[in-house]
Amino acid sequence: MLAFLRDVWHLMLMMRPQTDTEPIRPPIRLYRIGDVVRHTPFSRQTIHNYTIMGLIREAEWTQGGHRLYDESVFDRLSRILTLRQTKTLSEIRDILRSEAPDGTRAQAT
């Protein structure tokens, strides 16, 4: 159902007249912690711990105080899963902090 709604949204955006001042962007998809748990090998507690440790970051909060994660959390968790094979969580945190948001090495200033 979500895929259908996303396709409809993209069609609506394509049919809307484009202007030079406003780029067309699809809406950001946000995931509750349960959604993240369902689509990854991580437990709810692990996702919570990684958030507290700063390994992953919530994108927004609901009015009820629940964390919402954007799609980038899945790339970040994949990176953590790979690094976890040979690194400690402390080392992983340092590595992730030194990388730019897109996964490349951050430039020293």
Image (tube, rainbow, N blue to C red):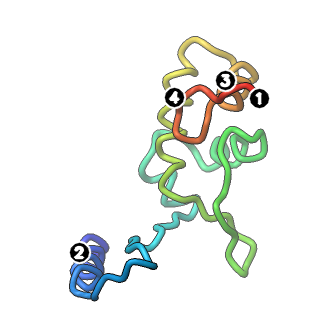
Q: Which residue is mark 4?
A: 81
Alpha-carbon neighbours of circle 4 within 10 Å: few (<14), some, or many (≥20)? some
* Whether residue 87 is situated above or below residue 71 in the rendered picture: above
Q: Which residue is mark 3?
A: 95
Give x and y (percent) for residue 50: 69, 41
Mark nearest the camera among 1 and 3 is 1
Pick the residue in front: 8 or 4.
8
**Inter-mark Cα distance, 1 to 4:** 29 Å
Give x and y (percent) for residue 23: 41, 73
Which part of the image, by quadrant, shows the C terminus?
top right
Q: Earlier in the sequence, mark 2 or mark 1?
A: 2
Label 3: element kind: helix
Pick the residue in front: 2 or 25.
25
Q: Earlier in the sequence, mark 4 or mark 3?
A: 4
Q: Amino acid at mark 1?
A: Thr
Q: Earlier in the sequence, mark 1 or mark 3?
A: 3
In this picture, residue 103 sits left or right of residue 108: left
Pick the residue in front: 92 or 65.
92
Residue furthest top as drawn: 86
Alpha-carbon neighbours of circle 2 within 10 Å: few (<14), some, or many (≥20)? few
Question: Residue 7 shows which numbered tag?
Answer: 2
Label 2: element kind: helix
Q: Earlier in the sequence, mark 2 or mark 3?
A: 2
Q: Residue at x 61, y 50 (%)?
A: 44
Q: Which residue is mark 1?
A: 109
**Inter-mark Cα distance, 1 to 3:** 17 Å
**Inter-mark Cα distance, 2 to 3:** 37 Å
Q: Earlier in the sequence, mark 1 or mark 4?
A: 4
